[in-house]
Image (cartoon, rainbow, N blue to C red):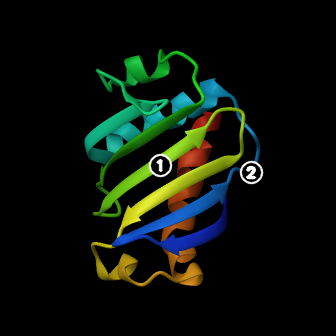
């Protein structure tokens, strides 16, 4: 995944990423289901509507929509994270709380260093 842009939004770092390849709904839900193991207080939204039961099975079975978003506290990064995928698009929006020293400074190079491998892992889960 490639980091396109980054901005500071009142205590949150908002970034725009581009997937290596465009993917369909099936790959997006696979990635979200994969991510569920690595978050506390995990929530999923399909077209901005909460998915009542965010189990792997219900995520995989989510009806196709324009977007799917997941959010929670990352067990790896130790901060709240929200990631939004858009169906049939290569655009991904990621919002990370500036809750630790690693994320307090909004700088392209530092943020890319912190997040690039993390985002690549999420993208790779789409192709399992």
Measure the C-alpha gap from mark 2 to mark 1. Answer: 16 Å
User: SS at mark 1?
Assistant: strand
Residue drawn 56% across the image and 34% down it:
67
Can you give x and y, in whole percent of width and height, for residue 68 in the image?
50, 34
When the figure is inspected, residue 40 is found, relative to residue 56, above or below; the finding is: below
Residue drawn 29% across the image and 63% down it:
79
Residue drawn 51% across the image and 75% down it:
111
Mark number, residue 83? 1
Residue drawn 69% across the image and 29% down it:
24
The residue wearing badge 2 is 20
Can you give x and y, in whole percent of width and height, for residue 40 in the image?
24, 46
Sequence-wise, the earlier of marks 2 and 1 is: 2
Residue lying furthest left: 41
Q: Quadrant of residue 101?
A: bottom left
Can you give x and y, in whole percent of width and height, for residue 61 in the image?
47, 15
Circle 2 packing at 10 Å, graded few (<14), some (14-19), many (20+), is few
Mark number, residue 34? none
Tag 2 near tag 1, CB within 8 Å: no
């Amino acid at each position: 995944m490639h980091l396109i842009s980054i901005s500071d939004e009142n205590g949150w770092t908002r970034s725009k990423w581009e997937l290596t390849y465009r993917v369909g709904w099936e790959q997006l839900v696979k990635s979200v289901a994969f991510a569920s193991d690595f978050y506390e207080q995990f929530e999923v939204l399909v077209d901005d509507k909460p998915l009542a039961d965010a189990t792997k099975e219900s995520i995989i079975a989510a009806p196709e929509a324009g977007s799917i978003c997941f959010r929670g506290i990352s067990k790896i990064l130790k901060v709240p994270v929200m990631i939004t995928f858009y169906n049939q698009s290569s655009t991904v929006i990621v919002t990370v709380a500036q809750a630790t020293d690693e994320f307090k400074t909004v700088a392209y190079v530092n943020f890319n260093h912190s997040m690039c491998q993390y985002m690549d892992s999420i993208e790779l889960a789409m192709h399992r």
